[in-house]
Amino acid sequence: MDIEWEKARIRSQIREYRKLLTKEELLQYDKDLLEEFKAAVKADKELKKAFDSSRVVAVYKAVGGELPCDALAAYMRKAGKKTAYPLVKGEDMVFIGVKDPASELIPGSYGIPEPSCKKGIIDSESIDIMILPGIAFDPEGNRLGQGGGYYDRWLSSVPVDKRPLLIGVCMENQMMGLLPVSSSDIPVDMVLCI
């Protein structure tokens, strides 16, 4: 089996599904993700410890039927955490702190909302938790992204012992039995599936 062909097939399949999602469904999924996170924090001692001690949480602004994490990001800010959003710079990605996504995010690379202010890059080793979107995940924590490799390159640049806790988030139909993986793919530490 050709790994890249299989990844492309899965991406195509999930993107077709996401086109069918309504705004109402996505709004509900946004709320459901927050509740799933709260339940996971209560049930998982390691996650609770990481959440309680975290200061900076990397999140994203959903596009194209991705699972929204707006409610989760707002919850993080209410809990006193700084939220950081990705900004694409050429082939790389950096994270910038954002207090008010409604006023501070503008359409950027690939139409993805990103910080309008290009200053205030957060040091990669300062990010404690990272919420990662994905096309698909599997029970081993393998993640299939959009195909640009931005998250994997960013994560590869951070020493393993300094990486944030990686939490993949997805909808139920995005969980696969086992994903095809390349040597450059970095798995997440846990997956929250709604």
Image (cartoon, rainbow, N blue to C red):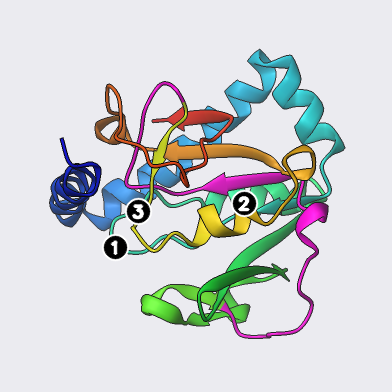
Q: Quadrant of the N terminus?
A: top left
Name the residue type under label 3. Answer: Glu
The foreground one among 64 and 122 is 122
Report whether 3 appears left or right of 191: left
Q: Residues within 10 Å of mark 1 (few under 14, many from 20)?
A: few
| Snapshot quadrant of residue 52 | top right
Which residue is at 70% across, 25% downward?
A: 47
Question: Which SS class for mark 2?
Answer: helix
- Residue 64 lies, in percent from the top left, at 29, 62
Q: Where is mark 3, residue-wise?
A: 66
Q: Where is mark 2, residue-wise?
A: 155
* Lower position in the chain sequence, tag 2 or tag 1: 1
**Numbered range of the magenta stretch:** 115-140
Q: Main secondary structure of the magenta part?
A: loop
Question: Which SS class for mark 1?
Answer: loop
Report whether 101 appears left or right of 23: right
